[in-house]
Image (cartoon, rainbow, N blue to C red):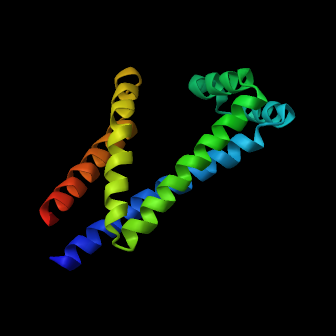
Amino acid sequence: MAAQRHDALRVIAAYKFLKMLGLLIVAVAAFGMVREARLVALADWVMQLPFHLGHRFLVLAIDRMLDIGPRQFIAIGIAACVYAAVFAVEGWGLWRGRRWAEWLTVIVTASLIPFESWELHHRFTWLKLSALIVNIAVVWYLAWLLRRRE
């Protein structure tokens, strides 16, 4: 039983590390867009791609990014770094089998579920639904594990 629990915690830790990596990519991109010239160059490059006519959502996203100023990109980058740090701490603690990490993961992940549900309700995608289901399963499993050990 202990080996199974350890393996499950490592799977959850790997999931947290993957989320951390994604947020670090977002942070690097956001900090890279602080200079307006880079954002305009990105928009020009996307417009040059042969498939941009068929991807109005990509063009719309670029237009929205052009409306965001440097301060908002800095805020996005900082927020992404903060969340990446939280996911790194959760992942490291879970990988090492620390009980405090189980509690931290339950609290942090459960606190984000209402926001994920709201976002899913307003802008449904299968990826968002999958992430919500995985996060609910993580909270359920860790809560079950913590209650079982009390």
| Residue 93 appears in the figure | yes
Residue 81 in the image, given as x and y percentages of width and height = 61, 49
Q: In which image quadrant can residue 40 be found?
A: top right
> Foreground residue, 60 or 29?
29
**Residue 67 point in image, percent of width and height:** 72, 20
Quarter occupied by the N terminus: bottom left
Looking at the rendered image, the quarter that the C terminus falls into is bottom left
Position of 138 with respect to 95 (left or right) is: left
Query: Percent position (x, y) of residue 7?
Result: 28, 73
Residue in view at x 86 percent, y 33 percent:
37
Residue at image coords 78%, 33%: 39
Residue 106 horizontal/vertical position (percent) = 31, 51
Can I make out residue 47 in this image?
A: no
Is residue 120 rendered to the left or right of residue 50? Answer: left
Q: Does 123 appear above or below 32?
A: above
Residue pushed farthest bottom?
A: 3
Q: In this view of the protein, which residue sits in the foreground, 51 or 82?
A: 82
Total label count? 0
- Dividing the picture into quadrants, the one containing residue 126 is top left
User: In the current view of this chain or complex, which residue is farthest to the right?
Assistant: 37
Residue displayed at 57% across by 25% down: 57
Direction from residue 73 to residue 79 in the image, left or right: left
